[in-house]
Image (cartoon, grey):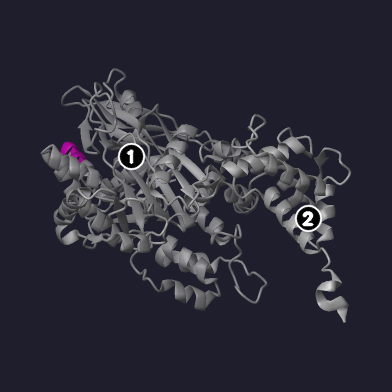
């Protein structure tokens, strides 16, 4: 192992998020002997839980102009330059996205138009596409689900969008390709120090590392140590000096994912002034719709959990901008997560909304270099500033940064039509081929070569993990080559299933664990542990808990008497013996009567979703609670509700037509 066998590195980077991996890539491409360690997985923290935008920051430009803040202006200009670079070096993982700013008052039109045009102007030659104004009718053409009342028009501007976790991984893999010793699941337990013979002061000279998966500990020596741990910035600084004053004020940002029909395929929405002054984005992403974000002070944790209050806040803001024809239902939240922003702030600051994303490079008395603050888009320039400081401070033999225009893994030979070759050469479905090309770029062929034969006429290869998503089994095998060590790595960062649909991720888990177990020689005990850990991750960190709690024993039944009578009739159609509950046997009987076959395991799963007291049967009050929750939108897509409704309709259609309608059959 390179980390253990190297006597001394030039630079050791702690933290495998976007900034840490960016530092490692910047350093290694300058010819420096570089190492990077991450206590969890690459992008497991903030870098995988963003709004998925590569942006300059429209609201920061607004603050720069209104407050005559030169620093904010410089930050926006830098971010717009970095936006253009990121779109160039990872074209498979990123693309320009038009974002609509709907206007409901006439005075807003010139006000926002000037601001957005300033955004284009500051971008200069890096402007993706010019912004433009839309009339009310044209705005509704582009965004038909928009609130029509009082709409006067809209302004459309462009920013970039990307697959954040995959982008982070591409940076890490590129650094490794250039020779950096990179390791996830490698925790720093303490910093190593030695006395400088010239000054007599203690200097940081490396770190004591622990392999999280095996427990093995060893020392990694380095001339320079960079702390790029995001929200955990201060915990590493305290390893160096326990009395250090904190510089990081964490802020929680919650996002939710909803079905793709909530937004157009290629048009986002910006709400510049929500009910409490925060900005909400509403964007198409991976054929779904992502909405967020909140901004509230929080405690630093490795496992942030989205709260029900934050989810409902986002839903309420979305309702304000969508047509009343579109029912925004709580049950349509397919996934939800919370990310912790590592904002740099004055400890006396009272709120987080006014804090900028400017980054700072701090050097401690013992030579520990800390990079803090900033945002996803500017990771590369943050890394360049940090490595510049390291080179100067430690007299390292290195030239200038080489990362502007340096293609990330998968980007160099990618083209928009690459997926066609995957379809033609390997017999993949077009949707799967497009997904592989967008995710892996020119490395998609390596994944296709590993794809299993389906046994069907078409597609020839590419067995899906779950039917409604284009992820295939081969990606699990390939993910292990990309440093995936756990099932959570696979469902959340190598694939994005957990971020798109927690139920689909849960459905895919057994197959993923089995495939990983076969490749990594896991014992049955390890497989069970992986399954349980990943299920807990989905339940708490990806919003499954909030989703399932929409139907509980205390759910109120808010149905009108005619509706209650209708649902009681439907229930008794299944409860033929009037027991007051229905079982798998009852459901099978009705399904057989309408010639529908369904295996017992699936039926058991369907009933368990509604069986609140887990006694193996669904009582009438449980069924009425379910239908009430469906009515109010707290629950959507209930398989039992849809199954029973469909069965009732099919039975109704089987009523014989009276022969007198055809003249007695003569």
Question: Magenta includes 335?
Answer: no
Residue on which the image places disc 2 = 599
Residue drawn at x 58%, y 49% is 505
Magenta highlight: main SS: helix
Label 1: how many Cα within 10 Å (few below 14, some 14–19, many 20+): some
In the image as oriented, which residue stretches furthest toward the top?
243
Q: Is residue 599 visible?
A: yes
Residue 109: % across, % down? 21, 52
Q: Quadrant of residue 143?
A: bottom left
Residue on which the image places disc 1 = 274
Q: Is residue 439 left or right of residue 506?
A: left
Label 2: how many Cα within 10 Å (few below 14, some 14–19, many 20+): few
Residue drawn at x 19%, y 43% is 62
Mark 2 falls on what kind of element? loop
Quarter holding the C terminus is bottom right
Question: Total of numbered circles in the picture?
Answer: 2
Which one is in front, 641 or 474? 641
**In the rendered view, would you say 666 is above or below 221?**
below
Could you tell me how far apart the alpha carbons at marks 2 and 1 are, in whole angstroms? 48 Å
The span shown in magenta is 389-394
**In the rendered view, would you say 264 is above or below 350?**
below
Which one is in front, 322 or 397? 322
User: Disc 2 vs disc 1: Cβ atoms closer than 8 Å?
Assistant: no
Foreground: disc 2 or disc 1: 1
Residue 282: % across, % down? 38, 49
Q: Is residue 32 visible?
A: no
Which one is in front, 440 or 649? 649
Mark 1 falls on what kind of element? loop
Quarter holding the N terminus is top left
Question: Magenta includes 390?
Answer: yes
Residue drawn at x 54%, y 44% is 488
Residue 568: % across, % down? 76, 43
């Amino acid at each position: 192992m390179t980390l253990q066998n190297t006597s001394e590195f030039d630079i050791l980077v702690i933290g495998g998020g976007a900034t840490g991996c960016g530092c490692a890539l910047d350093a290694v491409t300058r010819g420096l002997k570089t190492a990077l360690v991450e206590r969890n997985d690459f992008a497991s923290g903030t870098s995988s839980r963003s709004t998925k935008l590569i942006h300059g920051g429209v609201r920061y430009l607004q603050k720069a102009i209104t407050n005559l803040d030169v620093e904010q202006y410089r930050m926006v200009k830098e971010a717009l330059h970095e936006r253009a670079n990121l779109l160039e070096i990872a074209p498979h993982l990123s693309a320009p996205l038009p974002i609509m700013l709907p206007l409901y008052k006439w005075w807003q039109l010139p006000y926002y138009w000037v601001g957005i045009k300033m955004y284009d102007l500051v971008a200069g030659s890096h402007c993706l596409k010019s912004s433009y104004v839309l009339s009310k009718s044209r705005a509704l053409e582009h965004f038909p689900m928009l609130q029509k009342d009082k709409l006067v028009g809209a302004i459309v501007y462009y920013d970039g969008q990307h697959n954040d976790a995959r982008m982070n991984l591409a940076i890490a893999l590129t650094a490794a390709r250039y020779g950096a010793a990179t390791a996830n699941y490698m925790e720093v337990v303490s910093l190593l120090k030695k006395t400088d013979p010239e000054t007599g002061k203690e200097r940081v000279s490396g770190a004591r590392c622990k392999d999280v998966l095996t427990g093995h500990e060893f020392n990694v020596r380095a001339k320079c140590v960079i702390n790029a741990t995001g929200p955990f910035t201060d915990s590493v600084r305290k390893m160096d000096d326990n009395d250090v004053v904190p510089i990081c004020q964490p802020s929680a940002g919650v996002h939710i994912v909803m079905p793709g029909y909530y937004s157009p395929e290629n048009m986002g929405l910006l709400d510049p002034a929500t009910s409490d002054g925060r900005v909400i984005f509403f964007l198409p992403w991976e054929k779904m719709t992502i909405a967020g974000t909140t901004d509230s002070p929080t405690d630093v944790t490795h496992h942030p959990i989205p709260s029900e209050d934050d989810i409902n806040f986002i839903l309420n803001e979305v309702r304000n901008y969508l047509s009343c024809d579109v029912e925004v239902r709580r049950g349509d939240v397919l996934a939800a997560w919370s990310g912790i922003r590592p904002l740099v702030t004055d400890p006396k600051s009272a709120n987080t909304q006014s804090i900028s994303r400017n980054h700072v490079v701090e050097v401690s008395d013992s030579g520990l270099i800390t990079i803090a603050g900033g945002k996803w888009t500017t990771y590369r320039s943050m890394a360049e500033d940090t490595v510049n400081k390291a080179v100067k401070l430690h007299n390292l033999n290195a030239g200038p940064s080489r990362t502007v225009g340096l293609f990330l893994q998968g980007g160099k030979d990618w083209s928009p039509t690459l997926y066609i070759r995957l379809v033609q050469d390997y017999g993949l479905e077009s949707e799967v081929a497009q997904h592989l090309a967008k995710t892996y770029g020119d490395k998609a062929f390596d994944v296709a070569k590993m794809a299993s034969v389906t046994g069907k006429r078409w597609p020839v290869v590419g067995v899906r993990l779950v039917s409604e998503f284009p992820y295939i089994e081969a990606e699990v095998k390939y993910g292990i080559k990309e440093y995936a060590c756990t099932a959570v790595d696979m469902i959340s960062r190598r694939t994005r299933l957990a971020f798109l649909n927690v139920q689909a991720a849960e459905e895919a888990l057994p197959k993923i664990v089995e495939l990983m177990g076969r490749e990594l020689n896991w014992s049955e005990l390890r497989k069970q542990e992986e399954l349980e850990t990943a299920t807990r991750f989905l339940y708490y960190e990806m919003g499954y808990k909030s989703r399932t709690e929409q139907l509980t024993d205390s759910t109120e039944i808010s149905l009108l008497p005619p509706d209650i009578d209708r649902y009681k009739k439907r229930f008794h159609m299944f409860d033929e013996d009037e027991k007051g509950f229905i079982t798998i046997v009852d459901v099978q009987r009705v399904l057989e009567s309408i010639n529908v076959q369904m295996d017992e395991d699936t039926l058991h799963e369907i009933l368990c979703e509604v069986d609140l007291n887990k006694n193996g049967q669904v009582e009438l009050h449980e069924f009425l609670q379910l239908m009430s929750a469906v009515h109010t939108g707290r629950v959507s897509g209930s398989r039992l509700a849809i199954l029973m409704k469909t069965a009732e309709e099919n039975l109704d259609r089987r009523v014989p037509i009276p022969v007198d309608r055809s003249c007695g059959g003569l």
